[in-house]
Image (spheres, rainbow, N blue to C red):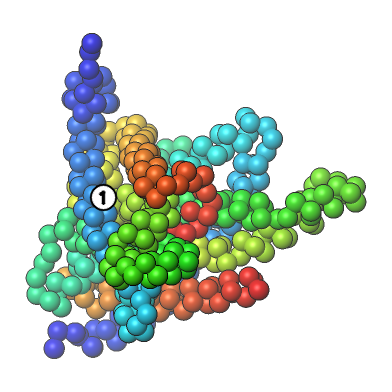
Amino acid sequence: MIWDWDWTLEILPGLLTQGLLVTFQATLGGAVLAFVLGLFVALLRRSRRPYISRPVGAISEFIRSTPLLVQLFVLYYVMPDFGVRMTALTTGIIGLGVHYASYTSEVYRAGIEGVPKGQWEAAIALNLPRHWTWISVVLPQAVRRSLPALGNYLVAIFKESPQLSVITVVDVIGLARELGSERFRYLEPMTIAGLFFLLIAIPASILIRRMERRLDT
Amino acid sequence: MITINPCSAELPGALGETMPFLCDGAVITLQSAVGGSVLAIAIALPVGLMATSRHRGVRAAARVYMEFFRGTSVLVQLFWLFYAMPLLTGFQLDKLFAGILALGLNLGAYGSEVVRGAVRAVPRGQLEAAVALNLSPFQRMRYVVLPQAFVEMVPPMNNLLIELLKATSLLSAITVADLAYEGRLLVNSGSDQLIVFALLLAIYFLLSYLITLLMRFVEGRAARVVGRERPRRRAATAVEAAR
């Protein structure tokens, strides 16, 4: 028998509690940051002043075209030079959040563009101030339309969070690597860690597909 | 005219120090990106078509593959292939090969979804007309469905190829000497961090941009083959389809 059940049972609790906890922290932190930052990026990109909209657009395009891993390196190695000291997990959450904000801003943009023109015209006809038009008419509809796509990105952030293990965050995968290197035996910890991701990501994406269908009708 | 070799060690200052190594890395990155995308496309076409099949069993097989490989990220699959699988099967994959395999299998699953969507988007009337003209199933695919589906596939494929390029950086985690690996090595051996990382990001951005240029060209050609104007860009929807 290749598979070592005794060892599996020994490492399972640690992976389930300590490892998954860090993974969930990274996912939730990254997602909240990405969702908030993405909305601001989307709004700034719609600005009528080109000296605001152009650079914001270019930066977000640049972040989307370069690997998250390299961005994490930049944050992890360069930030301390400027006197900013953070834990690896915080660095990772900022990296995930900023990287995925460049994706979620596109989602919000599509959502904002999907708000019917009549809604804008009605707001003007009611003499609503511009910021009230955004807050009470446009954004609630735009965000609602964006929810399924944002859900997909939540799952994407969850799945990509193991990249933080490369900058020494001990998440599920980081812990699995540690456990494996103790015995030079990676089969059990890596398989368990992989199964975690499958068992959470697949039901989650099925759930989101259901939500999508429901919002459509 | 003076030509400047961007990889030469004679460049001034930190550039001459770092660029030769980064160029070595860029070659490995390109190799894994090309290898990964060839494998991904080779998987995506048949599996995507299987997912539109009339037979339930065939569809289910395609679904299982797609859900399985989209359920975890490239990094997890890479670690599993490289660290865990040797114990189970008894043979160790070469690290670059393991990397290309993980990239191809993962992005192939996303690509299958793109192929499936594009084939389903071909209007029903086209297929009915092909049946009415007594074309064989193979001819219907080859001359009617695929050329039209191909035009639809290109923009989301563009995004997937950029995702694939970005994912090649993960190969550095299993010590493949790609761009990210060389960059990290340079930083650890004392080169100026800011310059190395700026160059790294710039090279990755340049490669992504090259992919976009190439795919726009392919899209224009594909659209002309089926007698269409080049479709307008739909950045937002394309990004969503890539997920």
* Foreground residue among A5 and B10: B10
Q: In the drawing, does residue A118 fall left or right of residue B234?
A: right
The residue at 23%/55% (across/down) is B38
**Residue holding disc 1:** B33
Q: Which element type, helix, strand or loop, lies under badge 1?
A: helix
* Foreground residue among B175 and B134: B134
Quarter of the rendering containing residue A148: bottom right
- Residue lying furthest right in this view? A126
Task: Point out residue B226 in the picture as x, y percentages from the top left corner.
Answer: 39, 50
Mark yes or no: residue A152 visible.
Answer: yes
The residue at 55%/63% (across/down) is A149
Task: Point out residue A166 in the picture as x, y percentages from the top left corner.
Answer: 32, 56
Eyeballing the image, is B79 above or below B157? below
Amino acid bearing label 1 = Ala
Q: Chain of mark 1?
A: B
Quarter of the rendering containing residue A169: bottom left
* Foreground residue among A188 and B242: B242
- Residue lying furthest front in this view? B133
Task: Point out residue B139 in the picture as x, y percentages from the top left corner.
Answer: 29, 65
Q: In the drawing, does residue B20 fall left or right of residue A90?
A: left
On the rendered image, what quadrant is the N terminus of chain A found in? bottom left
* Foreground residue among B8 and B148: B148
Task: Point out residue A160 in the picture as x, y percentages from the top left corner.
Answer: 40, 61
Q: Residues within 10 Å of mark 1 (few under 14, many from 20)?
A: many
The residue at 68%/58% (across/down) is A142
- Residue lying furthest top in this view? B1
Q: In the drawing, does residue A131 fall left or right of residue B128?
A: right
On the rendered image, what quadrant is the C terminus of chain A found in? bottom right
Eyeballing the image, is B125 above or below B237? below
